[in-house]
Image: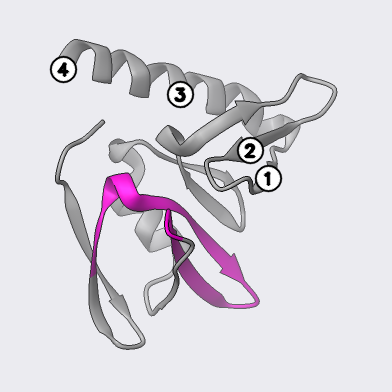
Amino acid sequence: MIKNFNINLPSKKGKVAANLNQILYFESMRGIDYMVLLNEEKIELTMNITEIEQILWSQGFFRVSKNYLINLRMIQVIFPDDIPMIMLENGKRLFVPGSRQKALFKALESVYQLENTLY
């Protein structure tokens, strides 16, 4: 895992710093964007999920759907093909559209290959 890499993002309460290893996912619902941490804290952001994706695409985050940008390191279970879902560390299950499944596996492969070469 990336060690001690923090990101500062604008929130409703000012800038918030988070270690990338503590971020489960980013969620966009009804025009409001959130960062969800391992401790289940949900922080409302003033930056949208598309902007966040542009910053974090090379840091092991993947846009699994329009509403979710996930930390690939937080995937706990990948369900079989007939159930196109993943489960994150906190037990949250997310649907993975068929059009995103191949890209998800490719992104997972590259993240774990990179980590194996670094450590």
2 and 1 marks in contact (CB < 8 Å)? yes
Local SS, label 1: strand
Q: CA distance from mark 4 to mark 1?
A: 29 Å
Q: Which residue is mark 4?
A: 118
Q: Which residue is mark 2?
A: 87
Q: Which residue is mark 3?
A: 108
Q: CA distance from mark 4 to mark 3?
A: 16 Å
The x and y percentages for residue 62 are 47, 40
Q: Earlier in the sequence, mark 2 or mark 1?
A: 2
Q: Earlier in the sequence, mark 4 or mark 3?
A: 3
**Relative to residue 85, is residue 23 drawn left or right?**
left
Q: Earlier in the sequence, mark 3 or mark 1?
A: 1
Residue 114's quadrant in the figure? top left
Q: CA distance from mark 2 to mark 3?
A: 14 Å
Which residue lies most toward the bottom here?
A: 13
Q: Residues within 10 Å of mark 2 (few under 14, many from 20)?
A: some
